[in-house]
Structures are given as structure tokens and as C-alpha cells.
Image (spheres, rainbow, N blue to C red):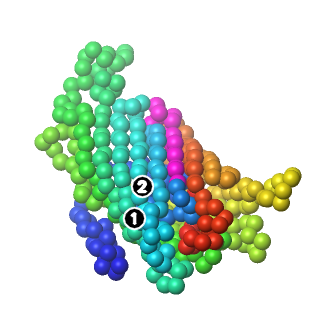
Amino acid sequence: MKKIILYFFILMIAGIVPASSQDAHYSQWLNTPLALNPAMTGVFNGKFRFSNDFRSQWSGITKAYTDIHVSADLPVGRSLLRNGQFFGVGFMLSQNRSGSDFFRQTIIQGSLSYTTPIDDGDNFISVGFQGGLNQNSVNMSGSTWGSQWNGDDFDAGAGYGENVSLEQFSFVDLSAGVFWHYVPDQYNFVYAGLAASHIGGENTSFFINEVYNIHRRYTVNVGSDISTSDEHQTWFSPKALFMIQGSQKEIAGGFAIKNKVRFKSQYTNYQKELMFSLGAYYRFADALIVSARFEYNNLSVGLSYDYTLSSLRKNANAGSAYEITIAILNPLKRGEIRRNYNKMPKFF
């Protein structure tokens, strides 16, 4: 196991040489786990997880950025392997659009992880690998260029005069990660992860004779859920994210307060639970993020709003960003939890 972990660390830092381009980012980053760290694949307390995220950013700049993210993952071999070991498999599809569909990026990735306890069963470590195809495309006919301006308006018939060699191309993309979580009981957990994306540093230039390598992205995320009472009605949930990609850095952190409300059946003693959380986060030198999340049975819905604090709001009339997430989790039944529960965090 130590050799496997060492191999993944070497794989992640294998290309610290410079490279170029930037990725989409999310304010509800835990709800896009496969985009965050492939080692988080299958790491949740359930049988199957589906996540969907829609983000609209800076709509004041002619629909500057929109992003749609869909992922599904599940743990495999939990009943076959011993001592809480298991594999995770997952699939991710996302599409990023900018400039009223002028530029579009489509990402299709598959991921595989392996999780094992590293002590008596409270500490777990996972390693993960992800690979697939990225496709970049530009819609030249839907764009406008300075050479088309005739002094009064844009003349589309004038042509754009840009010698773009490729309007669409694809490349293989690879990522790897390591993830640790500590779960002393089913009410509390702590976690930390490290991941590297774009390990191959692929050329993303639209010109055949030019090289524009995508920057490798390094991601660190940490957080916890801490129960604040013996009744386990309220949780304090701090978390932080650090990403670096070339010369660009993103640092975000904050916390949420999560509360559980119970509804007792009118005819039986069975109780249903509704989880509600409200959080505030700060993305350094960029935005204040306010988020809310509702969890009921196997469904979770999250809403967040980014209030831009940087000069971009004033200079470009950019507005802010909002994000909507929907997740479906097929949970373990009560009897299965007693038999198979291996202290997994409830990432939902």
C-alpha cells in the first residue's frame, strides 16, 4: 500500500515544468467531488451517488461563463474485500461555455479509486486516478472581431480575418489524487485531500504550428463535520480550498452550520429527518459566497450566490455568480449500516 501511495505522489508532481490555460471553478466544490479529487470517487456513506451542478458567472458580460457538471460514482467490492477496503468507480461529464457559446469545452472522464484503513478502522486513505477526453471548440461564425467594425456596427459579411487552424480538437487528460479521512463515529469526521490535474500538460492551441500547454492544477481541500451536542442535532462544518494553476491561485474558506429537524409519523414511531445548512465562505480577493443546502431522504439541493468584491464588479458591470446543485444518494439501509458501516463521511 505504501508503494501505491508513493507512486501516486510521484505521478502528481511529475511535471512541475511550466505549462498554460485555466479550469472552471465551483463555489460548492464538495458537490463536484470527481472534479475536485479523483481519490474521492466512491468515498461516501451509501451505495450510489449522482451529482449535478449548474453555474452561471458574470452574466453581465454577455453570458460570460456557464458550466454544467454531471457525475455518478459508487463503491465496489465492499463486501468482498476485508477490513473496510473497497474500490470506487465513477464517471464525470461537464461542459463549460463562455462568450455566448463562442468557446466551449466538453470533458468526459472516468475515475477509479482504492480505499483502505491505515489503523484500527478510524483513519482511511484513498488513492485515485482519472482519465478521459477533453474537447475544445470555437464558433467562429458566431463571433465578432475588430476587423468587422465599419465605424457604425459589426459587418458579419466582412469576415474575421483570423487564421484559426482548428475550430475543434480533443486531447487525452489525466489526473491523480490522494485523500485521507478520519471518522471516529457516524456523527463526526475530518478529511484532507491533494490532487493534480492535467498531468500530461497537453497542447491546447487552436493553431497547428503553435504550442500552448495547459497548466497543471494542484488542489488541496480540507474540512470536517463536528457534532456540537450529545443529541447530534447541530453540526459545525468548516472547510477550505486551495488551488494553483500556473500563475493563478484560488484560496477559499469558511463554514456552515447544519441542523437536523425530525418529523414523527402520525401513525408509527418512525421519524423522518430533514437536514438544513447555511454557510458563508470567502474567496480571497474575489467574492463572498453565501450558500444553503437541504437534505431529505436521498435527495439534496444546494444553492449558492457569489457576491463579487473585486474591481471587476465596478469596471465591467459583471454582476456576480450563482450555482445550483442537485444530488441523489442511494443510502445504506439501517440493517446494512450495522453490518457494513465502515465509518464513511457523508459527502452528499
**Residue at mark 2:** 90
The reply to whether callout 2 and callout 1 are in contact (CB within 8 Å) is yes
Residue at coordinates 63% horizontally, 50% vertically from top-left?
Answer: 299
The image shows residue 185 at horizontal and vertical percentages of 63, 76
Q: Quadrant of the N terminus?
A: bottom left
- Nearest the camera: 60 or 178? 178
Residue at coordinates 16% horizontally, 44% vertically from top-left?
Answer: 210
Mark 2 and mark 1: Cα distance apart in space: 9 Å
The image shows residue 257 at horizontal and vertical percentages of 69, 62
| Circle count | 2
Q: In the rendered view, would you say 79 is above or below 280?
A: below
Q: Amino acid at mark 2?
A: Gly
Question: Which stretch did the figure color magenta?
Answer: 49-64
Q: In the rendered view, would you say 109 is above or below 253?
A: above
275 left or right, relative to 310? right
**Residue at mark 1:** 113
